[in-house]
Amino acid sequence: KMAHGHGHCSHDHDHDSSSEDVAILYSLYQKIDLDKVQCLNEESEGSGKTVFKSWEERMDTENFVVSDLDEELLFYVPFTGDVKLKGLRVIGGGGDTHPSELRIFKNRPLLGFDEVRGPPDQVIELTHDETAQVEYTVKPTKFASCQSLLLHFSKNFGGENTEIYYIGLRGEFTKGHRHGVTICSYEARPNPADHKTEEHNPSSNFVQ
């Protein structure tokens, strides 16, 4: 009967299935627009996006990101819809290469490190975690409607570089904001046919 619990994961599960529960909760990576994910100061190009993976793959040490010139890493994470972010988990490198501070910004474009020097929407002090046991909760009111996140790992525990193996996001996803974007793009290019119909409308109404 436990197999039927997928839809409502918080009900009658025992401790044996807790990992399965977490896997369901942390499936938000599927709603990230991976092609548009960017990571500034990554040593190897394209490595930043590989840390957004399934819960089952969190211990995979083949795919990870290392910072390049210093300890900072800045991720731009766009979603394919609207996200209500509730929590996150991070697996970092061993010893002093593990990130120690995360600064989160909601719905900001990725312009560069200078743009994230101001006050973030939330700062999270990170602890050493190489298995993603620690969940960090975010302020629900601040992150109720996210189309994108900037994740700024600003410090580590003293290493020259920072290593990250996994970033897991938990929250609710709704399809939505893309539709608005589509409407805007139509309005930006008026269709002459629309205007013709508008011009004819008054006379057709008059006839009735």
Image: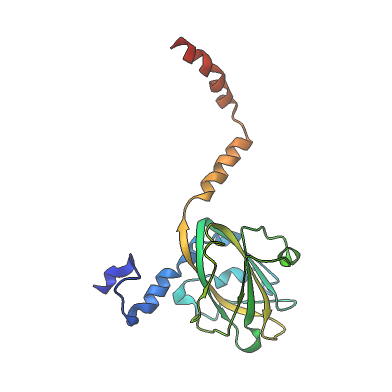
Q: Residue at x 53, y 50 (%)?
A: 177
Q: Is residue 189 above or below residue 65?
A: above
Which residue in the rendered view is the most extreme toward the top? 207
- Image-quadrant location for residue 35: bottom right
Residue 118 appears anywhere in the view:
yes
In the figure, residue 90 lies in which quadrant? bottom right
Image spot of residue 124 (x, y percent): 60, 75
When the figure is inspected, residue 88 is found, relative to residue 143, above or below; the finding is below
Residue at 55%, 40% (x, y): give it: 183
Question: Residue 131 location in percent, x, y?
Answer: 50, 83
Name of the residue lying farthest toward the left = 1
User: At x 58% / y 83%, what residue is drawn?
Assistant: 127
Q: Quadrant of the C terminus?
A: top left
In the rendered view, tell whether residue 177 sits above or below residue 6: above
Total count of labels: 0
Question: Which color scheme does this rendered protein use?
Answer: rainbow
User: Where in the figure is residue 70, as x and y percent of width and height?
Assistant: 74, 78
Left or right? Give the position of 163 relative to 111.
left
Residue 100 falls left or right of residue 59? right
Query: Residue reaching furthest bottom?
Result: 95
Task: Name the image quarter holding the N terminus.
Answer: bottom left
> Looking at the image, which is closer to me, 9 or 111?
9
Where is residue 100 shown, x and y percent of the image? 63, 81
89 and 38: which one is in front?
89
Q: Is residue 45 visible in this depiction of the protein?
A: no
